[in-house]
Image (cartoon, rainbow, N blue to C red):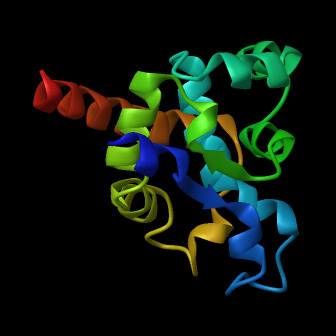
Amino acid sequence: MNEETKTKSIYDSAKSHFLGNFPKALPIEQAYVHIGIYLGWVVDHELYSEYFEDETGVQIYRFKNKEISCTILSEVWDGYLGHELFSEEGNLFTYYYYGSGIYHKDYQTLLAADLPSIYYVRDDWDTFEKMSAKIEARFEEWQALVK
């Protein structure tokens, strides 16, 4: 990824979801779940930037101690995922996995296959653990590719 691409990389935004085809019957927080699960995995693997750490502060600690959910972690950033939130390695992986759409396909297949849409996925620790295992497997695949 070159510097120009890197500076323009916005991977996702909850706002683009709840202003789009978001189901009116659901609470708006559901637009943050898929973003929060990914961000939670990044936090657990410390693939975030110093900027993210400086700006998020205690929320990292609270998330790691399961005091706040994936949705709340995402809401801290207004449901935004951009390049400045990630370390160099985190950004390269996010560009590969999230930016390419692989994450969304995995999320749909693993968590939302029997649901009306991805917005119906529950924000709970079982869901997070299930998706985290898939992200971890993809991360290991990616590491093998880039070595």
Q: Looking at the rendering, in which quadrant would you find the N terminus?
A: top left
Image height of 146 relative to 95, above or below: above
Going by the image, does 25 lie left or right of 140? Answer: right
Residue at left offset 67%, top offset 44%: 36
Residue 113 x/y as whole percent: 43, 70
Going by the image, does 81 lie left or right of 75? Answer: left
Q: Residue furthest front?
A: 4
Residue 20 figure quarter: bottom right
Residue at left offset 54%, top offset 55%: 11
Image height of 79 relative to 141, above or below: below
Q: Nearer the viewer, residue 123 or 60?
A: 60
Going by the image, does 95 lie left or right of 75? Answer: left
Residue at left offset 44%, top offset 61%: 104
Residue at left offset 53%, top offset 53%: 8
Image height of 84 relative to 33, above or below: above
Q: Looking at the rendering, in which quadrant would you find the C terminus?
A: top left
Q: How many marks?
A: 0
Residue 118 x/y as whole percent: 57, 69
